[in-house]
Amino acid sequence: METNNRSLSLVELNALVRRSIRTCLPDEYWVQAELSDVRSNYSGHCYLEFVQKDTKSNALVAKARGIIWSNVYQLLKPYFERETGQAFVSGIKVLVKVTVDFHELYGYSLTVVDIDPSYTLGDMVRRRKEILRRLEADGILTMNKELELPELLQRIAVISSATAAGYGDFCNQLAHNAFGFVFYPKLFPAVMQGDQVEISIIAALDKIYASGIDWDAVVIIRGGGATSDLSGFDTYDLAAHCAQFPLPIITGIGHERDDTVLDLISHTRVKTPTAAAEFLINHQRQTAEHLEALALFFAESLPDRIRREKERLERCVSRIPSQVQMRLQRETFRQERLGKRMEMAWQTRLVREQYRLQVEQRLMSAAGRRLEQEQHRLQLLEQRVQAASPEVLLKRGYSLTLKDGKAVTDIAQLQAGDEVETRLAKGTFRSKVL
């Protein structure tokens, strides 16, 4: 095979690419991207990757190697974390000013020279608002705020780091309060910074719920620490667990400028662990003042109330004889009226019954007379019937002519040749009509 005298070595090709990139892209450029694989070495340089993901599928659509030289990183990282309260770690979105470079050995890379924290703050605010919208859509955003604080806040479940100075300050404040109130705090250890914040606090809440102790409230405190570690308190799962927890949650996680999602869904938000202790003490003081006011009220009002009730009772007792006498008179009068009414009712009933008996007697007399009249009328009818009897007429000399068993009353009923029967008082005979 013939060798091409114009071929390039790899180093020469990469050098050509490097010169071309520097010629075509000589300026600095602001780039929006997400941090990935952020790490720093012993020399203070920060090596990372910039990635861009598809908004729908979350698949990678672009990736570039990045570097922040130590002299820039030592200034840029504290500035970013101070302004945003967010650690400079993988997973956050940033707006960085970069130069485009290409190295013969290491290839294509972006060198960071500046960063705009306001872009990341805007992304954090958007993410926080999205979490709050999701909590509200689930109907749990204000559930913990709607719980009522007990009158006595003594049994306190504390979620904090066991070694945190804030936890010690919290307990010391409760134990040495100026009013001598007694509190019973118990620590449920949790990691309060880093990637394990969410998992650790949720596990502590589960332990509190499973302890079976009738706690009055839960206090989540975080003493000191960088504000860049607050991202662990801005997660949906942690907010959902706290919002639905059956005890009021008081937060004091040591920052003043911004409220985390955990602060926004908790029952009460204070700034620091000592402020949380002061809140509990003030609540107890208000309860004590209320009880003292009630005790004073009872002490001042009870004697007067007892005196008034005693006077009222004496008046009632003094009125009893007259009331009894009046009641007896009313009952006597009522009984007399009832007796008279009963007497009049019996007399009226007696008159009605006597009248009813007289009516019955008149009815019986009228019925007897009517019976006699009917008997007499029947006798007359019987006589008439007997007088009209054919046998009686026949005995008087009359005869009865029958044709085919029927009486003949008109000559027109007969024709020549008809046979008729003639019935007399004694006997009958037959004859033929001529």
Image (spheres, helix red, strand yellow):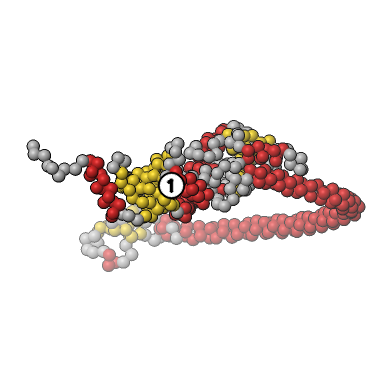
Q: Position of residue 206 (x, y in %)?
A: 54, 35
Q: Position of residue 144 (x, y in %)?
A: 57, 46
Name the quadrant containing residue 73. Answer: top left
Relative horizontal placement of residue 279, taking residue 145 as reference (left or right): right
Instruction: Residue type at mark 1: give it.
Output: Ile
Relative horizontal placement of residue 136, taking residue 51 as reference (left or right): right
> Tag 1: Cα neighbours inside 10 Å, few (<14), some, or many (≥20)?
some
Q: Count the labels in the image.
A: 1
* Residue sticking out furthest to the left: 1
Q: Nearer the viewer, residue 260 or 97?
A: 97
The residue that appears at 31% across and 41% down in the rendered structure is 106
Q: Nearer the viewer, residue 264 or 125?
A: 125
Q: Position of residue 168 (x, y in %)?
A: 65, 37
The residue that appears at 16% across and 43% down in the rendered structure is 7
Q: Nearer the viewer, residue 420 or 21?
A: 21
Q: Nearer the viewer, residue 419 or 76?
A: 76
Q: Quadrant of the C terminus?
A: bottom left
Relative horizontal placement of residue 256, taking residue 361 as reference (left or right): left
Q: Is residue 430 above or below residue 254?
A: below
Q: Quadrant of the N terminus?
A: top left
Q: Position of residue 143 (x, y in %)?
A: 55, 48
The residue that appears at 37% across and 59% down in the rendered structure is 399
Which residue was labeled with disc 1?
92
Relative horizontal placement of residue 243, taking residue 272 as reference (left or right): left
